[in-house]
């Protein structure tokens, strides 16, 4: 049987360390790290996700400041708010919840955030630092993926990794993090020819295509580690909805270890967001 990598338990460890870091900062006379969250409109999924972030911030001792704006808020108003938060020394992290309303240019908004406060790791400066191995803030989900892998893998040197999905949010950054560990990385996507054959050569598969149950049991060689980043809500034959990943986990008993969906990568994303906020605060205090 494959080992199930418990993302909830690992996220709890990350959050505990983060809370201790916050307590140490305050005990030494510093200000508790501050995270500003900007939510434009009332997308239901975004509302739920922001609520979880706020709740975890409180538990970790991070000051969370919400800016909820109507869906018809002009783009210049959003940019002006980011400028104010960039200039506020009490704010160490800025997060703009995506998706944004169609009249707002998401790339322009994300580029406006001070790279040192870009706790999502999406700013071109942080992307460039990641690609060159020169620091910066790492995107939360790829960072969480690496922590999950670290719980079952000691040495990545020479391992074959197949990343399925080429997004700027997961696929590309996680491939760069794995390259830094001396793994041999192949980045694929759902249009890759003979994708099952490519996947079967992998010691590690990171599935981030957003395609429910794309990765079947015969795609995975015995002893491989499988990280399932996908999360899709599907409707069963009886009309009930459930969350599934990119992998047919029930077919992966022959793998070394797999992440469940839900309860795998998801909890790690928020934990790493808070960890990034504390890191940004530490760097700001030494600037």
Image: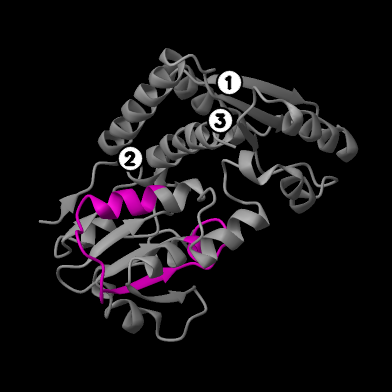
Whether residue 231 appears in this view of the structure is no
Vertical placement of 246 versus 286: above or below? below
The quadrant holding residue 186 is: bottom left
State the extent of the magenta-drawn residues as a range: 144-173
Give me the residue at 53% from left, 66% from top: 131
Q: Nearer the viewer, residue 120 or 232?
A: 120
The outermost residue toward the front is 286
For discs 3 and 1, the disc positioned in front in the rendered view: 3
Q: Is residue 124 magenta?
A: no
Q: Is residue 146 left or right of residue 69?
A: left
Q: Return the disc, 2 or 3, that comes first in the chain's sequence.
A: 2
Mark toward the start of the polypeptide (2 vs 1):
1
Residue 156: image location, x then y, percent: 26, 67
Q: Which mark is residue 263?
A: 2
What secondary structure is found at the residue carrying circle 2?
Answer: loop
The quadrant in which the N terminus is found is: bottom left
Write the residue at 45% across / 74% down.
Answer: 187
The vertical placement of 72 against 64, above or below, is: below
The answer to the question of whether label 2 and label 3 lie on touching residues, with beta carbons closer than 8 A, is no
Distance from disc 3 to disc 1, alpha carbons, whole Å, reads 19 Å
Of labels 2 and 3, the one closer to you:
3
Q: Position of residue 202 (x, y in %)?
A: 28, 75
What residue is at 28 percent from the left and 67 percent from the top? 204
Distance of label 2 from label 3 (alpha carbons): 34 Å
Q: Point out the tag, 3 or 1, that comes first from the N-terminus.
A: 1
* Disc 1 secondary structure class: strand
**Which mark, by number, is residue 64?**
1
Q: Kindly indicate the quadrant of the structure image that contains residue 73.
A: top right
Circle 2 crowding by C-alpha within 10 Å: few under 14, some 14–19, many from 20: some
Residue 191 position in % (x across, y down) = 52, 78
- Left or right position of 252 against 285: left
Q: Which residue is mark 3?
A: 285
């Amino acid at each position: 049987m494959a080992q199930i990598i418990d993302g909830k338990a690992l996220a709890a460890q990350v959050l505990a360390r983060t809370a201790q870091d916050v307590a140490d900062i305050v005990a030494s006379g510093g200000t508790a790290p501050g995270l500003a969250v900007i939510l434009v409109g009332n997308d239901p999924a975004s509302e739920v996700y922001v609520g979880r972030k706020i709740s975890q911030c409180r538990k970790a001792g991070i000051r969370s400041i919400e800016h909820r704006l109507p869906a018809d808020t002009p783009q210049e108003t959003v940019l002006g708010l980011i400028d104010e938060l960039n200039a506020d020394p009490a704010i160490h992290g800025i997060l703009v919840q995506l998706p944004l309303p169609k009249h707002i240019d998401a790339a322009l908004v994300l580029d406006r955030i001070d790279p040192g406060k870009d706790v999502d790791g999406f700013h071109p400066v942080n992307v460039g630092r990641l690609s060159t191995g020169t620091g910066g803030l790492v995107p939360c989900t790829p960072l969480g993926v690496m922590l999950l892998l670290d719980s079952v893998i000691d040495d990545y040197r020479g391992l074959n990794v197949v990343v399925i999905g080429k997004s700027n949010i997961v696929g590309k950054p996680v491939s760069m993090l794995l390259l830094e560990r001396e793994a041999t990385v192949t980045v694929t996507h759902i249009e890759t020819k003979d994708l099952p054959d490519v996947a079967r050569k992998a010691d590690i598969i990171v599935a981030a295509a957003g395609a429910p149950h794309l990765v079947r049991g015969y795609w995975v060689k015995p002893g491989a580690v499988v990280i399932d980043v996908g999360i899709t809500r599907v409707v069963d034959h009886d009309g009930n909805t459930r969350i599934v990943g990119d992998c047919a986990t029930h077919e992966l008993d022959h793998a070394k270890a797999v992440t469940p969906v839900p309860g795998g990568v998801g909890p790690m994303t928020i934990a790493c967001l808070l960890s990034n906020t504390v890191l940004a605060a530490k760097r700001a205090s030494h600037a």
